[in-house]
Image (tube, grey):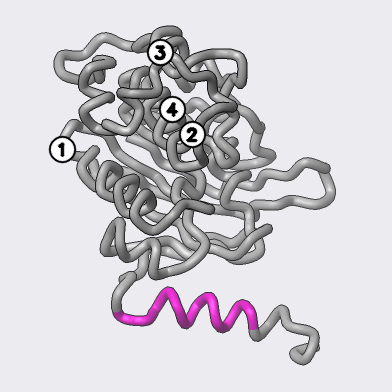
Amino acid sequence: MLQVSDLTVGYHRDTPVLREACLDLTDVAVHAIVGPNGAGKTTLLHTLAGHLRPTPGVVLCDGRDVTGWRPHQAARVGVALAPQGRRLWPSLTVAEHLTIAQPTRQRPGSAFSIDELLQVFPALTGRLHHHGHQLSGGEQQMLTIARALRTAPRLLLADEPTEGLAPTVAHQVTAVLRQLPQRGVTVLVTVPHVRAAAALTDTVHVLTTGHLSRPVDASDGQAERLLRDHLTLTSPSAE
């Protein structure tokens, strides 16, 4: 559904964060991007969600040029962002978060009802009347993903969804993401290391200093070698 070609994005014109990135999401599956902090993972997801404009580069959705689309336009074709840091409204309850996140498109079987989401994340059931700031970090992450799924996405952009979570909660979130392709949802997830990516999918893209690799196997050491080579080239001793 989504093809990205030669995407260059930056917060200042002369200092791009992403450089000529290419990505092809034609399979309904979980796709992982691995890279160290500052590599451009968040920048890529925010560009695909319509929060940043590429210069230059091309983004195609179902073959249609949507380069530079706005967030509401991305949402209407089924792109949802579960951002790093969660960004919940502290004054709204769990129930209110799920109620205001309405499906942005109509397709049979695409929308998650609130009851379904509570089955996916049963820890939220007893917290429906608690405000966002009253939740634990794990509960906040569950609500962030549930809020995104409530919009009936075709593509879920999940930015480091297991960051800072206890192992048991991280495992639960990972299990939910792995099952989403069965509901027709493609997942593009960013993670900081290969082990986390391997728990989600078999193939990964490695993002280092703005450059995105072709898909590589998460289990045979290719991704680890790419990251290790990057760290060697960028370490002070390599200069």
Of callouts 3 and 1, which one flags the residue occurring earlier in the amino acid sequence?
Answer: 3
Identify the disc placed on residue 182: 1
Label 2 close to label 4 by CB (< 8 Å)? no
Instruction: Give me the C-alpha separation between circle 3 and circle 1.
Output: 26 Å
Region rendered in magenta? 220-231
> Which type of secondary structure does the marked residue at label 1 adopt?
helix
Mark 2 falls on what kind of element? helix
Few, some or many C-alpha atoms within 10 Å of disc 4 (few <14, some 14-19, many ≥20)?
many
Q: Mark 2 or mark 1: which comes first in sequence? A: 2
Residue 95, placed above or below residue 41: above
Separation of residues labelled 2 and 1 (CA atoms):
24 Å
* Disc 3: which residue: 95
Q: What kind of element bears circle 3? A: helix
Q: Residue at x 28, y 16 (%)?
A: 114
Tell me residue 102's x, y (percent). Answer: 38, 9
What secondary structure is the magenta-colored segment mainly? Answer: helix
Residue 139: image quadrant is top left
Residue appearing at x 47%, y 51% in the figure: 165
Q: Circle 2: is it few (<14), some (14-19), or many (20+) Cα within 10 Å? A: many
> In the picture, which quadrant includes the N terminus?
top left
Q: Distance between the residues labelled 4 and 1?
A: 17 Å
Q: Which of 51 and 169 is in front in this view?
A: 169
Give the residue drawn at x 69%, y 39%: 55
Q: Is mark 4 on a helix, strand or loop?
A: strand
Q: Which amino acid type is shown beneath numbered disc 2?
A: Gln
